[in-house]
């Protein structure tokens, strides 16, 4: 039998040559790395759009909510939200804006909900971005959890996440309803359910937004969107 080929080690001893394991071509490796990066939770390196809402409580300014959104994950849902913030389509229908809309009274469940005026910018019927749902499915942790879509959120470790969600089923879905959710602060038993059946399209990441939400939490009167747009 033919003796195996050897190589000389740094210590001077002979060692058999072993075939190198298969390595993916560089282009394939880059594509895999890109896909892995696209499913991360940090929004700083992704395509973003920024919208704001100036809030009033009983006619008094209460600060601004600023949203960093992810059009790369759910482009049509983000487009609907941005256009309603900007009032781009009020010439078509005066109801196609968030300006002047009120949030529902705070329920104590870390969620601030606004119904809007019940219309989306794409016409009649319910609008749900099914293509984005199929590519951005996320599971909440725990046995009592559920499924949500859009931007992933680290529900185990991130204790500060404040996210912007759109319902994909249930009351008010497929139109203008949205919610701001302090999911990071919520207890584990509630954390598993707060995002279920929603699409996470962005986050609030600044201290000014956190202070505005604090004022909305303790206010007796309704919080109203006095002005809104794209920053």
Image (cartoon, rainbow, N blue to C red):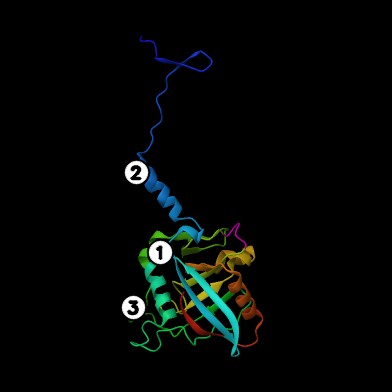
Check if mark 1's residue and mark 2's residue have beta carbons within 8 Å.
no
* Quarter location, residue 194: bottom right
Left or right of residue 145, residue 46 in this image:
left
Residues at marks 3 and 1, CA–CA distance in whole angstroms: 18 Å
Identify residue for label 2.
27
- Taking the spot 40% from the left edge, 63% from the top edge, the residue there is 72
Q: Is residue 12 magenta?
A: no
Extreme-front residue of the structure: 231
Pointer 1: residues within 10 angstroms few (<14), some, or many (20+)?
some
Q: Earlier in the sequence, mark 3 or mark 2?
A: 2
Across and down, in percent, residue 16 comes to 44, 17
Secondary structure at numbered mark 3: loop
Across and down, in percent, residue 165 comes to 49, 71
Residue 174 in view here: no
Task: Label the magenta part by its dominant secondary structure.
Answer: loop
Residues at marks 3 and 2, CA–CA distance in whole angstroms: 38 Å
| Residue range of the region highlighted in magenta in the rendering | 155-159
Identify residue for label 1.
133
Which of label 3 and label 2 is nearer to you? 2
**The N terminus: image quadrant:** top left
- Tag shown at residue 197: none
Across and down, in percent, residue 13 comes to 51, 13
Identify residue for label 3.
122
- Count of numbered labels shown in the rendering: 3
């Amino acid at each position: 039998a033919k003796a195996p080929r050897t190589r000389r080690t740094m210590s001077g001893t002979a060692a058999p040559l072993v075939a190198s394991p298969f390595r993916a071509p560089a282009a394939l490796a880059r594509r895999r790395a890109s896909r892995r990066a696209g499913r991360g939770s940090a929004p700083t390196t992704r395509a973003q759009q920024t919208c704001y809402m100036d809030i009033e409580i009983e006619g008094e300014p209460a600060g601004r909510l600023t949203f960093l959104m992810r059009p790369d994950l759910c482009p049509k849902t983000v487009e609907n939200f941005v256009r309603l913030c900007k009032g781009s389509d009020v010439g078509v229908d005066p109801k196609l804006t968030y300006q002047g809309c009120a949030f529902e009274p705070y329920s104590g469940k870390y969620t601030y909900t606004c119904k809007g005026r019940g219309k989306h910018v794409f016409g009649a019927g319910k609008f749900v971005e099914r293509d984005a749902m199929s590519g951005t499915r996320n599971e909440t942790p725990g046995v009592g959890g559920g499924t949500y879509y859009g931007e992933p959120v680290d529900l185990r470790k991130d204790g500060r996440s404040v996210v912007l969600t759109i319902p994909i089923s249930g009351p008010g879905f497929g139109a203008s309803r949205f919610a701001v959710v302090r999911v990071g602060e919520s207890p584990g038993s509630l954390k598993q359910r707060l995002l279920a059946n929603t699409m996470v399209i962005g986050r609030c990441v600044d201290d000014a937004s956190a202070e505005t939400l604090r004022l909305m939490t303790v206010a007796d009167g309704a919080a109203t969107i006095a002005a809104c747009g794209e920053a």
